[in-house]
Amino acid sequence: MASSSDSIQDILRKLPKMDRLLAEMPDEIPHGVKLSACRYMLETLRSQALAGKVVDIPPLDELVLRATELAFQRLRPSLRPVINATGVVIHTNLGRSLLPEEIFQTLTEIAGRYSNLEYNLQAGERGSRYSHVEGILRELTGAESALVVNNNAAAVLITLETLARGKEVVVSRGELVEIGGSFRIPDVMARSGAVLREVGATNRTHLKDYAMAIGEHTALLMKVHQSNFSIVGFTKSVSVKELSVLAHEHNLPLYEDLGSGNLVDLGAFGIVHEPTVQETMEAGADLVSFSGDKLLGGPQAGIIVGRRNLVDRIKRNPLNRALRIDKLTLATLEGVLRIYREPERAIKTIPTLHMLTTPIEEVRRKAERLFKRLHSLDLPFDLEIINTVSRVGGGAMPLQRIDSFAVSLEAGETRPSGSPRISTSRLEKALRQNEPAIIVRMEDEKIIMDLRTVQDNEIPMIADGIGMAVTRLEKTTHGN
């Protein structure tokens, strides 16, 4: 601790002037960023001195280096690519679905040039932005009409607000799901102005429960697909087909929120069957909504398909303007939907579908490639190729287990001669700070890198990132 105000003043006098620091920093850094970095560094040192802490003021060149590093950190984009080695395919925190490479050129052209977003080239007059995807959505799903908003929560909100504001919506108690981020179906329904009418029990709901709940204030029957959880054991639910007959007997629409809606059946690849949008429409649903960036493998969007008269009412809702999607989302969604015209090509080229269906032998070969690269680095860790389980993620197929292979790193006793012991927790943190960041799983103090979600060109990037991270950590450890 500093012993007197004189010693504190001595420390403060050693701090360089702001102008001197700024003059020594690289010219390519914007002045405002340099100023902010220098001010932060000097104020930190000044605060420590005034708090009575022993502060060793570095020489000018080191202070300039620190300020420059801080300035460059602030110049880096906040949203950056990362490597997903977690094995969670639709990882909400990591951006959910990857986009097919073949649509990147179209995105670049749409982003950098004017487009016919709301202009009808044939008629020479204003057109609708939804026309760019409505036709192909009708083609792929068999629906009469379609609308796209900015996410599926918005799709649920605008559908209920349009068709059921001030009226009752009948839903099974076992389907009142929380769809992520604490957004719950009852809360969304309340915001829409609709009145929730729960029927049945948590684990069992019968057709008669719906029938008894229908009254003069009922606006529609709603079914919510349990995509992010599963009730097992003594259970009972009512099918779309059964509900459709009941709804139409009472001149009511049936609306299903499919959540992670998909357009292809993945059952042939060992994936648990999820009802496709087409199947749900064919079973009698009048409206179906689903996400664009989950099992569909596209951009964030909420897609509504169904009967024309109902979709047209939703389109006319003033909320639609607040919830509409932009030109880049439309271009991306159109590109992804076009691929679905050839289901076999969709499986191969849409990353989400490809990762979910990649044969286990191919995943093992990737694990062997990574293991070989890491083994050649002579790391202070025990390496092993292990069997593991990948997850679908994104609130889809919660019980689905996808066999996979991973490379594990453990801080064992066998280390190169003279190398310090580095904990896996320190390495995991260092990998998050890598460029690009490498996101892994931690299990029993082991780093687990599941190769199902790792792209081929990312394998050398992971090996290089781990090698550099270990080198930095070893220097730090030796320095201590």
Image (cartoon, rainbow, N blue to C red):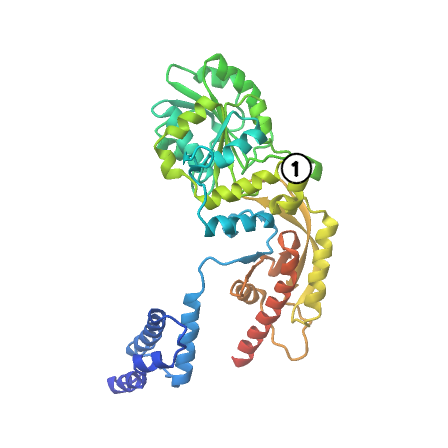
The x and y percentages for residue 213 are 44, 17
Left or right of 157 on screen, residue 243: right
Count of numbered tags: 1
Q: Is residue 249 above or below residue 387?
A: above
User: Which residue is at a point 53% across and 31% down the rendered structure image?
Assistant: 135
Left or right of 348 on screen, residue 36: left
User: Which residue is at a point 39% across and 76% down the rendered structure image?
Assistant: 27
User: Which residue is at a point 67% across and 73% down the rendered structure image?
Assistant: 415
Residue 195 appears in view: no
The x and y percentages for residue 166 are 33, 24
- Give the residue at the far top of this rendering: 249
Q: Residues within 10 Å of mark 1 (few under 14, many from 20)?
A: few
Residue 40, picture quadrant: bottom left
Q: Is residue 448 above or below residue 205?
A: below
Q: Is residue 35 above or below residue 369?
A: below
Residue 139, picture quadrant: top right
Q: Which residue is mark 1?
A: 343
Secondary structure beneath dot 1 equals: helix
Question: Which one is in front, 214 or 465?
Answer: 465
The x and y percentages for residue 438 are 56, 60
Residue 438 appears in view: yes
User: Which residue is at a point 68% across and 79% down the rendered structure image?
Assistant: 417
The x and y percentages for residue 304 are 48, 31
Left or right of 373 on screen, residue 108: left
**Residue type marked 1:** Pro
Q: Quadrant of the N terminus?
A: bottom left
